[in-house]
Structures are given as C-alpha cells and as structure tokens.
Image: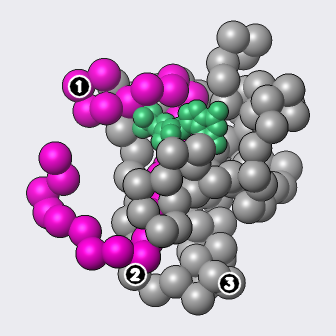
C-alpha cells in the first residue's frame, strides 16, 4: 500500500532498526519505546488491523506468534506482553497490522 508507513518501512523507504525478517514478516524496534524492550512484528502483506484479518490472510498471524516466541527465546526474555491495538479508541495510530512486544518492566492490568 503506497501511503502506508509500515509498508514503506518494509520496502526500506523509511529506515528502521531491524530485529528479524523472513518472507512473511518483519520485526523492528519501536521508535518510541514504552518498555526497555519494545519491538513490533508486522506482516509483509498489508493488513489494516486485527479487524481486517480473514480466513484467507490469517496464516501469517500464527507465523508471527511463532516468530515472537522464537525471538523472545533468543533474547532470553520469558516475561513479556503482546499487544495489538485495533481502531482509534483502542489507540491504533498506524493502520498496518502490528503486534507490539513489550518487556523489561512491571506491567499493570487492565491496560489504560
Ligand atoms: P499503534 O499506536 O498503532 O498501536 O502503534 C504504532 C507504533 O508505531 C507506535 O508505538 C509508534 O511509536 C510506532 N512508530 C510510528 N512511526 C514509526 C516509525 O517511523 N518507525 C518506528 N520504528 N516505529 C514507529
Ligand atoms: Zn501497510
């Protein structure tokens, strides 16, 4: 999608600090970290949000969670939170599906 910030990051048109990449997904550090560890994992195919996941495009979501498990293991992280904000009221600011991975500090529940 030409006017999508995260599609531009995947294409290398906007620089990012890469954590991991494969044919289906891209992981990179958040520009405004909310925890000592804060990276995002996104599908390479443009999906607008959790609300745009369908039977046809959902395989990548399971793949992303497997990648999150692998990356956190490699980083020695056992305690972490995975968040995906869907829609304005939930705090979504970039409309390309992404999973925040946050770790390294105590976290409260429920989230604000
Ligand atoms: P959301 O608010 O949609 O849940 O999450 C979007 C995230 O993208 C935010 O945490 C924000 O800091 C991050 N972000 C926005 N623009 C950029 C950017 O240009 N580079 C990186 N690395 N992260 C970004
Ligand atoms: Zn996109």
Give coordinates of residue 102: x percent, y percent: 44, 63
Tell me how many marks there are.
3
* Residue under the point 85% across and 49% down: 23
Q: Earlier in the sequence, mark 3 or mark 2?
A: 3
The Cα–Cα distance between marks 3 and 2, rounded to whole angstroms, is 13 Å
Please name the residue that numbered disc 3 is placed on: 74
Please name the residue that numbered disc 2 is placed on: 79
- Look at the image and tell me whether residue 95 can be seen: yes
Judged by its main secondary structure, the magenta piece is loop
Q: Does label 3 point to a residue whose CB lies under 8 Å from ligand 1?
A: no
The Cα–Cα distance between marks 2 and 1, rounded to whole angstroms, is 27 Å
3 and 1 marks in contact (CB < 8 Å): no
Q: Is 6 positioned to the left or the right of 38 in the image? A: right
Give coordinates of residue 24: x percent, y percent: 77, 48
Q: Earlier in the sequence, mark 3 or mark 1?
A: 3
Q: Does label 2 point to a residue whose CB lies under 8 Å from ligand 1?
A: no
* Residue under the point 46% across and 86% down: 78
Q: Residue furthest top?
A: 3
Q: Write down the region rendered in magenta.
A: 88-112
On whether residue 104 falls in the magenta region, the answer is: yes
């Amino acid at each position: 999608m030409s006017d999508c910030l995260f599609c531009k990051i995947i294409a290398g048109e906007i620089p990012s600090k890469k954590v991991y990449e494969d044919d289906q997904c891209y992981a990179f550090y958040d520009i405004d970290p909310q925890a000592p560890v804060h990276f995002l994992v996104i599908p390479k195919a443009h999906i607008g949000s959790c609300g745009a996941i369908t039977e046809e495009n959902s395989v990548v979501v399971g793949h992303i969670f497997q990648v999150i498990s692998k990356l956190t293991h490699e980083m020695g992280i056992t305690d972490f939170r995975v968040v995906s904000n869907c829609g304005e009221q939930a705090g979504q600011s970039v409309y390309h599906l992404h999973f925040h991975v946050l770790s390294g500090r105590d976290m409260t529940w429920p989230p604000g």
